Amino acid sequence: MSITLTPGAPPTVSSDDIDKRIAFLADDQILDVDLSDLTLQNSADANLLYDRIEQMIAATGEPLWFFLINYKGTRIEPGAWFAYTRRGKDLNLAHSMGSVRYDASEDTRLQIERSAGTDNFNPNLFADRDAAIDRLRAMPSKRQTPVVHIPNYTAEEFRGRIRFLESEDIMDVDFSNIVFQHSRDVNDCYDEIDKLVEATGRSWYFLVNYENTRIFSEAWVQYAARGKALNEAFSLGSVRYAPGSETETDIRLRAESGGFRPNIRNTREEALDRIAEMKAEVTEV
């Protein structure tokens, strides 16, 4: 599924408000998300919500949690629903041992159940918090059984896809035909990129080929986190080209709340033109 996103609408909620709504019940291994009386007006609201949840999970050092969500008085407007469900799917596949929801209004309940029907998950809707917690406590924890992902690529394969065009100040990254199936693939890739970039001791314009690239939902959380860290440390600006509709949609969603321009172009030539524009903008300043 692909959509046309309308960029520019700012979030109507704040990071501080979201942070107050997130708690970790360590004894029960529960991530407690309080969305009561919260209205998500647009996709920027939904993206900001999931950005903060991902960041707070990362800060715990523990990737796996049971999710407890309070939907009392929650409103998810049509403009927020696509981002809310798509980012929620990524978060659940990356970090959830089980999710339970409670106190949903009739409209929200129907939205969740419709989404459950299309995305093949159990909505686990309960009338009250105690029943929801009891359901989570009955679920088996996966923390005692570490997930071991089998790598799909070697370090040499990833290194062979990175070139430095020194005269143009460009790091040329070829992700064409790669499938990032899980976090192991992502970490293996970015471990090699980090080493190569750090060895240069300088920053670069990043030119990224996304032709036929696939990033599974299970990989997106880690992919976004590693990419953001790399860009903050070494990027003079990033331009991406030739993504399929699914990958382009995910990039645009995360850019909306991540404070960066997606800079997506159809072809390599157009992407190089954009980098030239970026260089000119710096010179003008």
Image (cartoon, helix red, strand yellow):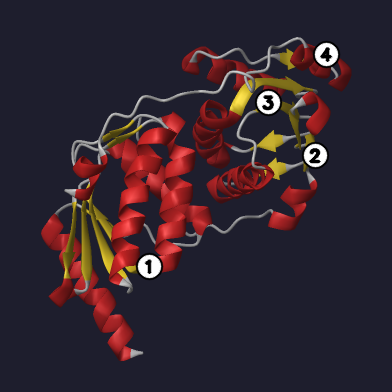
Residue topped by disc 2? 37
Counting residues from the N terminus, which is met first, the one under dot 3 or under dot 1?
A: 3
Counting residues from the N terminus, which is met first, the one under dot 1 or under dot 4?
A: 4
Position of 261 with respect to 135 (left or right) is left
Q: Which-is-in-front pick, marks 1 and 2?
A: 1
Distance from label 3 to label 2 (Cα)?
Answer: 12 Å
Q: Compared to 155, does 25 lie above or below?
A: above
Distance from label 1 to label 2 (Cα)?
Answer: 41 Å
Q: Compared to 12, does 120 lie above or below?
A: above
Q: Residue furthest bottom?
A: 284
Position of 72 with respect to 64 (left or right) is right
Would you say the residues marked 4 and 2 are in contact, meaning their CB atoms lie under 8 Å apart?
no
Q: Residue at x 72, y 15 (%)?
A: 125
**Residue 66 image offset from top left, x and y in percent:** 69, 24
Residue 225 versus residue 128: which sits nearer the camera? Answer: 225
Identify which amino acid the numbered label 4 is placed on: Asp
Counting residues from the N terminus, which is met first, the one under dot 3 or under dot 4?
A: 3
Identify which amino acid the numbered label 3 is placed on: Thr
**Residue 209 image offset from top left, x and y in percent:** 20, 50
Counting residues from the N terminus, which is met first, the one under dot 4 or under dot 2?
A: 2
Element marked by disc 1: helix
Residue 145 versus residue 36: which sits nearer the camera? Answer: 145
Residue topped by disc 3? 108
Q: Compared to 228, does 168 lie above or below?
A: below
Q: Which mark is residue 134?
A: 4
Residue 19 versus residue 166: which sits nearer the camera? Answer: 166
Residue topped by disc 1? 234
Element marked by disc 4: helix
Q: Which mark is residue 253?
A: none
Q: Which-is-in-front pick, marks 3 and 4?
A: 4
Q: Residue at x 49, y 40 (%)?
A: 221
